[in-house]
Image: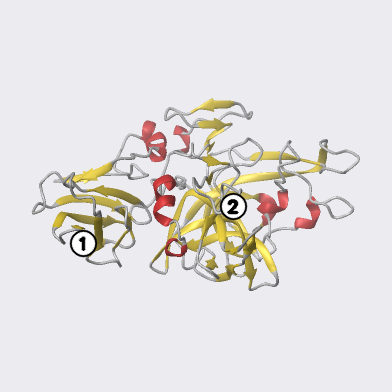
Amino acid sequence: MTMKLRQSTACRVVSPAVLLVLFFSVVSVGVENTQGWSGESGVEVAIGSAIQLAAKVDASDETGLVWTSADATLVQVFDNGFCFGVSPGITTIEAVSQGDGMRVSMFRVRVVDEPSPVIDPQTIREFSDNRKFVRDDGQVCYGSELNSRQPKSEATVSNRVINPNPPTQDKLLWLVEEDAPVVDGVGSLIGTIAPRKTATDVIYASRFNHGMTKIINGEIHIYAFGAKVRSTAGPKTGVSAWLALDDVLQKESLLELYHPGTGRLPALPLMSQRFIITGGDPASYRTKDGTPLSIVRNIRIGAQPEHYLSRPAGTVNIIYCVPGFGLGGHGLDSFLLSCRLIFTPAEGVRRFTMPTYYPQDHPQAGEKAPPTMTFVYGAVDVAGSPRIFGWVASEALEPIK
C-alpha cells in the first residue's frame, strides 16, 4: 500500500481551477508502519522534499532508534526519521532499536521527479491594485496569488527559521561546521562561513530561509540567509545562497521546523522574449553620498533595492515574493552572475512597480525617492540547475536581441 506524505506539491490534481491552491498546500504528517517489524510500508517523496517517518516503539524501550538508508544516493535519512528525496529510484529505510539491535520498522521509499505543475494564468487571482486578500488555503496575498506569504511559516521572522536554542541572543542563528562551504544554485563556490565573535567564544553560524531546499551535486542543501562568508570575490561579506544540510550542527532540530520543499513556486507559460540577468546597477539606488535607499516604507528595517540586483559576492537572488508588503521579500535561489542566466517572463501575470524611500539620516528620511523598482515573475534557466520560477527585478535584466 502506497501512502503520500508531506509533499509540498499536488501535481496529480487535474482541475485547473484549484491547482494553484493545491500547489501551495503542504501535508504535514508522520508516517507510521502499522504492519509490525516484519512488515514494509510504502511511501513516496519528491526530489528535494522530505517526509518524516515514524515507527512503533515499545514504551519500555527508551534507547531510541537508528535510522539507515539502503541507498543514500536515492534517499538520505536523519536521526529523527526525516527522509529526503535525492534522486529518482526506490530504496528501503530501516529503523533499528538501539537497545537490542532488532529491526522495528522498514519502509520502501520511492523518489519521484515532480516538476512544478504548469498553471493556466487565467486561473490566478490578480488585481490591478495591491489589495490584501486571503487565498483559499489561508495564505495572505497582495495584488496576486503569486505574491503571497510562504506556507507553514508561522515559526519564522520574515521567513527565517527561529532557533528554539540559539547559540547567541540572535534567535535566528543556527550553528554550522567551521568553514562550511556556501555555493550558488549550480554548486559553484561563493565562499566559506566566516567566524562570528560572541562575548565568550567564536562560533560559526547562519540564518536559514524557511522551506527552501535544493539537491546540488547529489547533496541536500538549504538556503542560508545573510551568511557571513570569506568570499572568493574578496574579503568577508554577506551572501544569501546554499549550504549543505550535513554542515548544520543542529540539523534535526532545524528539520522539525523547516517544512522542506515548501519554498517553491508554480510554473507558468512563458513569453517569447528572453533576457540576460546582468545584475543591473546598484549605485543607481543610492543617495548622492552613496547611502542605499530603502525598498520598504519602514526604513529602519534595512531592506534595500540593491539586494535584488548584483550583490557584493557577485551573485543575484531570485525571490519568492515582492518586497514591501511584509511577506519577507526573501530569496529562493541564488546564482553567480558569471553564469549565463537566462530569464523569461511568464505570460498573463501582472508586474509590481515598487517605490523606494530615502534612508535614515537623510534630510528627506522616509519620503519617497525618485527611483522605482519593478518585479517580474518568470523562469530562470542556467546550465546545471533545474528551471527556477520566481520574481526578478526588471532593472537586473537586459533583453537578448
Percent x, y of residue 94: 20, 59
The residue sitting at 23% across, 50% down in the picture is 62
Of 296 and 389, nearer the camera is 296
Mark nearer the viewer, 1 or 2? 2
Q: Is 165 positioned to the left or the right of 317 in the image?
A: left
Q: Disc 1 marks which amino acid?
A: Thr
The residue sitting at 56% across, 59% down in the picture is 205
Q: Is 4 positioned to the left or the right of 334 in the image?
A: left
Q: Is mark 1 on a helix, strand or loop?
A: strand
**Residue under circle 2?**
168
Task: Identify the colour scheme used.
Answer: secondary structure
Percent x, y of residue 144: 55, 33
The residue sitting at 30% across, 38% down in the picture is 13
| Residue 271 visible in the snapshot | no
Q: Disc 2 marks which amino acid?
A: Thr
Of 118 and 274, nearer the camera is 118
Q: In which quarter of the image is residue 275?
A: bottom right
Is residue 320 placed above or below 184 in the rendered structure? Answer: above
Q: What element carries label 2?
A: loop
Residue 182: image tag: none
| Residue 76 visible in the snapshot | yes
Q: The C terminus appears in which quarter of the rendering?
A: bottom right
Lower position in the chain sequence, tag 1 or tag 2: 1
Is residue 258 placed above or below 201 in the rendered structure? Answer: above
Percent x, y of residue 182: 54, 66
Residue 91: image tag: 1
* Residue found at the very far left of the displayed protein: 38
